[in-house]
Image (tube, rainbow, N blue to C red):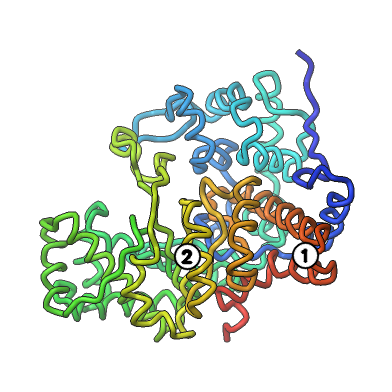
Amino acid sequence: MSRRPLLLHPERLFPPDPTTRGLAAELYNEVRSLPIVSPHGHTDPRWFADNRAFADPVSLLITPDHYLTRMLYSQGVALEELGVVPTDGTPVAPSRSAWRTFATHYHLFRATPSGLWFDHVLAEVFGIRYRLDAETADEIYDQVADALGRPEYLPRALLERFGIELLATTDSPLDDLDAHSRLAQDGLGRRIIPTFRPDPVVDPTFEGFSDNVDQLGELTGDDTRRWAGYLDALNNRREFFIRHGAVASDHGHPTATTANLASRDCQRLLDGATAGTLTADDLELFRGQLLVEMARMSIDDGLVMQLHPGSRRNHNALLYERFGRDRGADIPGPIEFTESLKALLDLVGNDPRLRLILFTLDETTFSRELAPLAGHYPSLLLGPPWWFLDSYEAMLRYRRTVTETAGFANTAGFNDDTRALLSIPARHDVSRRVDSAYLAELVSTHRLDLDDARELAVDLATRLARRAYRLDDRS
């Protein structure tokens, strides 16, 4: 078999109609080189603080990216064969062997977003000119490995090359943020910022929850077994994150349930949470109360709230037991927002000081609930499609479904939500192409003026994200 060329069509993802395709290309060319604003992601801040060469192609490109590993796992490839290390430290396939396994199965990604992103990384970041498969696996591995040893592929150099204006990481409330402290010392503290992710101390089903709550108290000097002291400790950690540059909190609750309970009921729930005795209904109430408390805190300290419920996390119990969380076994489920958020919205939903960005994995909520809610409440914005929905078809469905009710201004632009550093430009490129295609359709059907479309293309690429996360307000 001869090597097949790796070609990225310059008009990929644009409409097939020549007139609309031309409009999309015109709009895209105006935004393609704009800076990348990435206010919600999961890259490791230590990469940039240490600024060391990445170890090998597999640990950089494959093992951290559950979009990739889940597909091969679904086809019977063990994660150990892809270099994913179990929690017990059992040896796994060496890097080159894992790469060969991935390359042999790369055809599984045909017509998927992951395949599009990975091809973009190979072609645009590493200059690879042939498609990845079993025949080219070793050659491409060597090219990538050689590149990773050069100065221009160090993490900070890639930050510059990709034009990343801002990159937010996601961090435990128990994190000492040492990496971010070192970044600040090197002048990167406003460019790479933490995000306050309180799940380990607000979700009683999180592993080690009771110990985490105690550790929270040790960090802040507050009595976290008392409700008032527990809230004080959360406030203190938020302030700590803000001092390190944080602009947002991030909440991965199973549902959007919120609650407004009396203090004595909150203390009862906290007691049960730390003892591990709460019923399923009480678990929901506890998490729901914490969402309301976080909203109140956000009004005071200005952190933007992000809520993305509806993921049935770690659904594969065997995989979770062997490899831990975030290994590709999170499965979307139905979600309800309107009644679930009522307690929060009744209390603070009309306060413009609160900014709550709503994400979902359940597309059925776009027109039924999310667009009408964000189109009314001044505190709400719609986050872009994220995991499972950050694809060509789903992005178009999102725009077509929410725009007529919520408009563009009640959305938060785009964020890439990725652990894979090198895919960030690819994901933003896909978003800009899809938005250009959608705006071109509006222009070609005379629902939008071309000058307005040009302005909106820039909004969707950068300005809405800056506004949503109050990035221009930072002193």
Using residue 202 as the reference point, say whether residue 21 is left or right of it.
right
Q: Of callouts 2 and 1, which one flags the residue occurring earlier in the amino acid sequence?
A: 2
Neighbour class for label 1 at 10 Å: few (<14), some, many (≥20)?
few
Q: Position of residue 244 (x, y in %)?
A: 47, 75
Mark 1 highlights which residue? 447
Residue 201 or 437: which is nearer the viewer?
Answer: 437
Q: Position of residue 225 (x, y in %)?
A: 14, 72
Disc 2 residue type (three-letter): Leu
Looking at the rendered structure, the secondary structure element under dot 1 is loop
Res. 88 visible in picture: no
Using residue 288 as the reference point, say whether residue 127 is left or right of it.
right
Using residue 22 as the reference point, say whether residue 292 is left or right of it.
left
CA separation in Å, label 2 and label 1:
27 Å
Instruction: Tell me, for residue 344, which label it has, or none.
Output: none
Q: Position of residue 242 (x, y in %)?
A: 45, 78
Neighbour class for label 2 at 10 Å: few (<14), some, many (≥20)?
many
